[in-house]
Image (cartoon, rainbow, N blue to C red):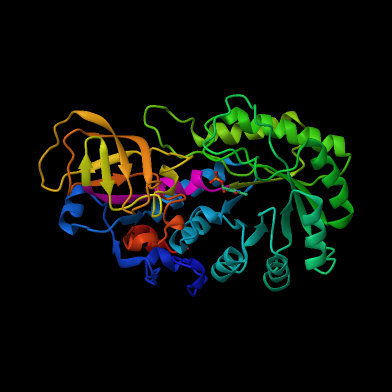
Amino acid sequence: MFNNPFQRSQKASYSALTFSQNETLPSVSEFISVSHAIDDDYIRQLKPNVPVSILEPQKLVKRTQKFVKAFTGHPMYAVKCNPDSVFLEAMYHGGIKRFDVASIGEVRLVKGLFPDAKLYFMHPIKAPEAIYEAYKEHGVRAFVLDYAGEVDKIIQATGGAKDLELFVRIAIPKNNPGGNVATDFSSKFGAKYDEGVELLKKCRPLCKKLGLSFHVGTQCHDPSIYAMAVDYAAMIMIDSGMNVEALDVGGGFPADLNSDQKLPPIQKFTKAIARSIKKNNLEHLDLLCEIGRGLVASAGSLIVRIEGRKNDLLYLNDGTYGGLFEAGGAIGLAYPAHPIRRENKPFSGSMAPFRFAGPTCDSVDMMRGPFMLPDDIQVGDWIRLEQLGAYGEVSRTDFNGFGRIKKIVIKSESLSKKGS
Ligand SMILES: Cc1ncc(COP(=O)(O)O)c(C=O)c1O
């Protein structure tokens, strides 16, 4: 598998912030560590002819500290969002000690880096071998499920373990107020109301700790959706009559993608959750979340080069098979775009909406945007796309031979000297 972070040997320390970590993925043709901001002049000198992924771990440390302070429970980080060890170590340093893992590869990766971290295996449908290894070799006790078959599988694969923490994942009804999410997360996974009630009853005698979890959908703009979901979860718990000990409010915290639409600050989301918890008398529960995008998106960006232009369609050297998966197809995220002129001359100043096409020959490799850029942008210019720390590099493939990138990590001497 291309770009497999799990094959790397990992060392448990915060050393990534000192950037001794220079073991690169197969896709990385050049790894550069700098201690200054990446400005347009730097890019003009670098003249990159492959996409450049930029990681800012110091920014992520700060963002993590802010979120950990605002969230009234224990945040987990959803590793799937970006498993780069530079980022994982930054979040660990910022106060995240629990991780939502979805595969045995993610279990091995995180345990290799942080042996003391608490892992939650939050994929509702798991391979029995993965459950076995996670439980027996890595000390994982927390597992999610959304139907009875998975309960039986977990019990069987762990040899009837008595120390399990089982989380029943419920689906959140679709017609929520606002419905303001990029992708609904309750169509593929999640028990319906009555199923959730029955699952809580089934799991209670089989586990040491019982929890309920949900995911409101990724890139959720509306804090009231979390409040509504907590209300709904509370009703399921009451109707089950079971003693539930944990509530996991999932991910969905948004990245700031659209400069026209001001996002509520992260505290609005955490306060809406806390208020709903209080209203429903659930303060005794162990509160968790599985944040992904809302933590890491702003700490990563991608520089792409324009290889062709037909009117409003820009042909880039990266696309949906590379770092821009979520800009394409059904998701269609329009990342904030900053133009960089090849020569050091100003753009016209007049902006226009553009679409992008990726480098592969596949006609689904298209991104509708609209991406607002100067109308005289041309072949050879670069574009810096922001908010790509989430679900960007992790989806890169080498389809059509376009997998190579440069990777730049912006280090800050002051912070790395402080160590962990
Ligand atoms: C089970 C689960 N938890 C958490 C997340 C992270 O979601 P987000 O990036 O929207 O915070 C995901 C994303 O796919 C998920 O599937």
Q: Which residues are magenta?
A: 291-307
* Image coordinates for residue 193, horizontal then vertical, percent: 78, 36
As drawn, is 111 to the left or to the right of 132?
A: left
Residue for point 46% across, 46% down: 63
Q: Position of residue 144 (x, y in %)?
A: 72, 53
- Relative placement, left or right, of 12 versus 42 is right
What residue sits 33% from the left and 49% below the top? 358
Instruction: List x then y, in percent, for residue 247.
Output: 72, 44
Q: How far across and down, in percent of the image, does residue 134 sit?
A: 68, 67
Q: Is 103 part of what is drawn in magenta?
A: no
Query: Most extreme residue toward the top, as rendered?
Result: 177
How many numbered marks does the figure carry? 0
Is residue 206 toward the left or the right of residue 327 in the image?
Answer: right
Q: Is residue 24 visible?
A: yes
Q: Is residue 106 left or right of residue 5?
A: right
Quarter residue 217 falls in: top right
Residue 72 appears in which quarter of the rendering?
top right
The relative height of residue 135 versus residue 79 in the rendered view (above or below) is below
Residue found at x 64% / y 34%: 273
Q: Can residue 403 be spotted in the picture?
A: no
Residue sitting at x 49%, y 33%: 265
Judge by depth and name the residue closer to the eye, 298 or 378.
378
Instruction: Give 322 or 111, whichever is nearer the viewer.
Output: 322
Q: Nearer the viewer, residue 39 or 196?
A: 196
Q: Is residue 303 magenta?
A: yes
In the image, residue 113 sits, relative to residue 371, either above or below, namely: below
